[in-house]
């Protein structure tokens, strides 16, 4: 049906390549391009179907444009880093190709992420008759679809939304991040932020916590309030939501190491002079931490990510909880990656499938809650991320 160009050959790129290869009736040809071609080749070697590989600097619009013109894909899946979102969107506009990503744009020199930069492409994509799907990972991504599904099938109005992300897995390392350490640490050390009564409220990083009892034997865990990008699009597209918060679990060990690293300045993103050379401490830290890709064979346990929505249905107060549980070892057996990469890569493939099969169509820039959740929810059950909905 279509040729797809995947950009980024990290943990998530590996899962996207495997999952696209599992659906040959939609993804008839797959090209995987990244900064380091050897990483693309290593992934291609794991997959029985032929995968073409290429080298590209995705910070460079001219290089991207030349690659897209040569490959002529039906869609570009961007699973490089958030820094590359705008250059890849520019290249898609220049070549007339649809676009999908899993994380919103971040400028390198500011630990700040928001949709304004990508929403500013709305008119350009609309005028070109192209579609850009933003944030088709798990959170953002599936959490946006879960919210839209709860609104469509369970509640007439959502008043309060809590998105809760638990990684109950253990990789046995003293300190490691489950996805790109630079992006992960920038996110976790940022101020908390939540939507309350029509305005954003800020909290000090990881200063608000509570216990949550996770289902299916995972049990009670401490969850910490953080800012996460889907809050911004959800309160925009579902303005009825009065309170929206995002919570994540962290092990005591992770928090202890992070505190020390912060205190000694290793999480700084401004350059410092070292032996006559400028280095960014967080980028240096990334270089010495375990590669998230290497955690695949080591990680045991499960993730549980979902949404709790409180609101009304036929005038009655109701609370619904919808979640997915994903097993790290099962993911590794299937695609050679742990569940954090898996839970991001599968929804990226599903978003691509929605666009290429015409189930999701439109001209402009879209977040997932703006589209019909039903075909995406069916695909989650079919392609490895089954979900469960209960009433609390
Ligand atoms: N929505 C969600 O649920 C969710 C969850 C986790 C992650 N994510 C997002 O998923 C994306 C990928 O994460 P990951 O864990 O796979 O990261 P990763 O392992 O660090 O992989 C990133 C890949 O992008 C490549 N890359 C970086 N800069 C590039 C450039 N200028 N040109 C070409 N390629 C470049 C890297 O190349 P090298 O190998 O040469 O460094 C690497 O292969 C990130 O944007 C992350 O924020 C989303």
Image (tube, rainbow, N blue to C red):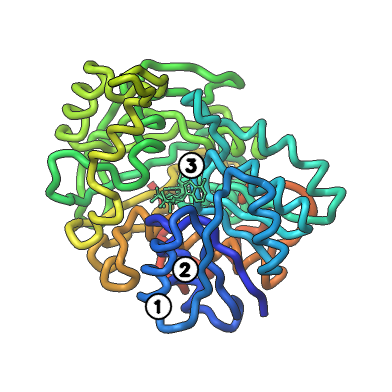
Q: 10 Å neighbourhood of mark 1: few (<14), some, or many (≥20)?
A: some
Where 176 sits versus 207, above or below? below
Where 315 sits versus 333, above or below? above
Q: Position of residue 259 (x, y in %)?
A: 22, 22
What element does badge 1 sit on? loop
Separation (CA) of disc 1 from disc 3: 40 Å
> Residue 47 bears which disc, if any?
1
Between residue 231 and residue 260, name the one nearer to us: 260
Report if the beta carbon of the residue with label 1 is closer than 8 angstroms to ligand 1: no
What element does badge 3 sit on? strand
- The residue at which mark 3 appears reads as 309
> At 72% from the left edge and 63% from the top edge, which residue is drawn?
69
Separation (CA) of disc 2 from disc 1: 8 Å
* Nearer mark to the viewer, of 2 and 3: 2
Q: Position of residue 7 (x, y in %)?
A: 54, 57
Where 32 sits versus 93, above or below? below
> At 17% from the left edge and 51% from the top edge, which residue is drawn?
171
Whether residues under marks 2 and 1 lie with C-beta atoms below 8 angstroms apart, the answer is yes
Between residue 374 and residue 118, name the one nearer to us: 118
Separation (CA) of disc 2 from disc 3: 33 Å
Q: Position of residue 119 (x, y in %)?
A: 70, 37
- The residue at which mark 2 appears reads as 17
Q: Earlier in the sequence, mark 2 or mark 3?
A: 2
Is residue 258 rendered to the left or right of residue 235? left
> Residue 57 bears which disc, if any?
none
Whether residues under marks 2 and 3 lie with C-beta atoms below 8 angstroms apart, the answer is no
Q: 10 Å neighbourhood of mark 2: few (<14), some, or many (≥20)?
A: many
Q: Position of residue 184 (x, y in %)?
A: 37, 37
What element does badge 2 sit on? helix
């Amino acid at each position: 049906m279509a040729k797809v160009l995947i950009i980024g050959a990290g943990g998530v790129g590996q899962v996207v390549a495997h999952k696209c290869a599992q659906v040959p009736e939609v993804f008839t040809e797959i090209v995987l391009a990244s900064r380091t071609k050897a990483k693309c080749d290593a992934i291609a070697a794991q997959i029985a179907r032929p995968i073409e590989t290429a080298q590209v600097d995705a910070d460079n619009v001219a290089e991207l444009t030349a690659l897209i013109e040569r490959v002529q894909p039906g869609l570009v899946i961007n699973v490089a880093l958030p820094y590359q979102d705008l250059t890849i969107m520019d290249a898609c506009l220049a070549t007339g190709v649809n676009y999908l990503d899993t994380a919103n744009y971040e400028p390198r020199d500011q630990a700040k992420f928001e949709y304004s930069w990508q929403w500013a492409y709305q008119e350009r994509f609309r005028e070109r008759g192209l579609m850009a799907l933003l944030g088709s990972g798990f959170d953002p991504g599936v959490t946006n679809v879960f919210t839209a599904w709860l609104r469509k099938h369970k509640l007439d109005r959502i008043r309060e939304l809590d998105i809760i992300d638990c990684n109950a897995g253990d990789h046995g390392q003293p300190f490691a991040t489950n996805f790109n350490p630079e992006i992960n640490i920038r996110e976790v050390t940022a101020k908390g932020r939540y939507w309350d009564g029509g305005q954003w409220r800020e909290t000090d990083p990881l200063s608000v916590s509570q216990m949550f009892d996770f289902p299916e034997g995972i049990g009670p865990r401490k969850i910490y309030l953080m800012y996460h990008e889907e809050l911004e699009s959800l309160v925009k597209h579902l303005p009825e939501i009065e309170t929206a918060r995002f919570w994540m679990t962290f092990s005591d060990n992770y928090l202890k190491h992070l505190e020390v690293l912060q205190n000694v300045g290793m999480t700084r993103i401004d350059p410092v002079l070292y032996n006559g050379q400028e280095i960014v401490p967080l980028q240096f830290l990334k270089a010495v931490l375990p590669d998230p890709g290497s955690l695949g064979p080591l990680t045991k346990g499960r993730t549980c990510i979902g949404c709790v929505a409180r609101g009304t249905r036929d005038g009655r107060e109701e609370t619904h909880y919808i979640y997915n549980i994903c097993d790290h070892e099962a993911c590794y057996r299937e695609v050679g990656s742990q569940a954090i990469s898996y839970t991001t890569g599968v929804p990226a493939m599903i978003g691509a499938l929605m666009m290429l099969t015409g189930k999701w169509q439109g001209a402009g820039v879209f977040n997932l809650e703006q589209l019909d959740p039903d075909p995406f929810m069916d695909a989650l059950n079919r392609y490895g991320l089954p979900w469960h909905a209960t009433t609390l």
